[in-house]
Amino acid sequence: MRPQMHMLALLLILGLANRVLVGQEQALAPFPLHMELELDRRECVVGENFTLVTRVYNPNSQTVILRDFTLGYEQPRLEASSADGSFRSIYCGPAETAPGEACQIGPGGSVTHRRFAYQDLSVMRWPDRAGVYRLRAVAPTTGSGQVNGVTVKIDWICSEVELRVREASAIERSAIDFLRDRQEQFDTGLREGKSVSLLLATTCRTFLSDYGNTVYAPEVRWRLARALVDLLASSDRRKLPSQTVVELVSVLDEAVTYCLSMGLPYSAEFLTWDLDRGGSPVFELATKHSRVELLQHIANELNHKVPDDDDADRYRRAIVLDAMGSKHEARQEINALLGQYPAGIYAKHAQFLLKEIDRRAAQQGSP
């Protein structure tokens, strides 16, 4: 009887071990994910910074967690076909956000990133000649993820798309030459310690004056808006005549409004909101210089982007009402915020704003 019990126990242990090992093999099998690429347009011009969407799609019935993976400008890498049919990498600029965040994708779910092909300003970039090319997004070769707490190897399935690149016209070639020449002047100015933002803003404004109807103008308007936000939020603005600052604020308003109207990726960095850093640089500039319509536009877009952030919505609405001169309504909004979220992250900022409204009202002798 005792030997039989030992034999049964041994068989039970072996059976359990076998099930564990089989389970591990199943869990450690390659986990397929799709790296997809979509172009906003299937045709562009030589030197044009086209826009696209990269997407990671999970076709499986299990949730996967990707660690050290940020869908941006470093991941995935873009590759373009060569004349011999092989693919080569094309440089697309720095990562938009620092890597290291965990990316979780549910069954049948996806994460997307709408972006420019190039984040940097260099005009010496692909596509540098006309033709028909294949493009693909290539994921990290060493990628791994976690499924049900078990580390799995990712089997990336990468799609390809076709892009037709046409030759630049005479005016477009002139525009490229202008940017190439200004790139050299820009590099010289940097070596001489001149303001990067001022150099870039000046270049963009001149370009738009001469080549504002070319296919390169949308990107240049985006770069102009970015440069002006940096310039007007920096100490370099103090070196400018007051009338120049007034003029540049007006140009900023127009450029940012254009970017917001274009949607992603043009609008992305103008719709960031970090309360610890003052909210949003462009929102702060619009408040400081009383650009009420721009304030309203940004506030509406932010509320649409994050519709359930009620205290942030109330705080921004109070700022807009104050800028419009509706001090009574601004106070009501602040008091409602403080009443509903007395210990919230916006309470201290709302109290400061209320004191500022009261201080200005006292100086002006108005209620």
Image: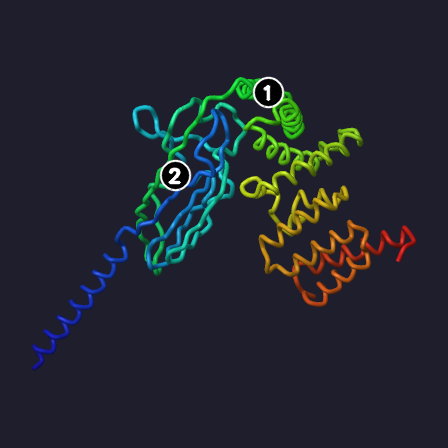
The amino acid on which the numbered mark 1 sits, given as a three-letter code, is Arg
Image quadrant holding the C terminus, namely bottom right
Pick whichever, 360 or 178, lies toward us.
178
Q: Please name the residue that numbered disc 1 is placed on.
A: 182
Residue depicted at 61% across the width and 59% down the height: 309
User: Which is nearer the N-term, disc 1 or disc 2?
Assistant: 2
Q: Would you identify the image quadrant in which residue 333 lies? A: bottom right
Query: In the structure shown, which secondary structural element does the residue marked by tag 1 occupy?
Result: helix
Q: Is residue 168 above or below residue 8?
A: above
Image quadrant holding the N terminus, namely bottom left
Crowd tier of the residue under label 2, counting other residues whose Cα lies within 10 Å: few below 14, some 14–19, many 20 or above: many
Left or right placement of residue 23 versus residue 261 in this view: left
Q: Residue 45: where, in percent of width, then height?
A: 48, 26
Residue 306 circle label? none
In the picture as drawn, the residue positioned furthest to the right comes out as: 365
Q: Would you identify the image quadrant in which residue 342 lies? A: bottom right
The amino acid on which the numbered mark 2 sits, given as a three-letter code, is Ala
- Label 1 – label 2 distance at C-alpha: 31 Å
Residue depicted at 42% across the width and 41% down the height: 38
Q: Please name the residue that numbered disc 2 is placed on.
A: 137
| Picture colour scheme | rainbow
Q: Residue 332: where, in percent of width, then height?
A: 77, 62
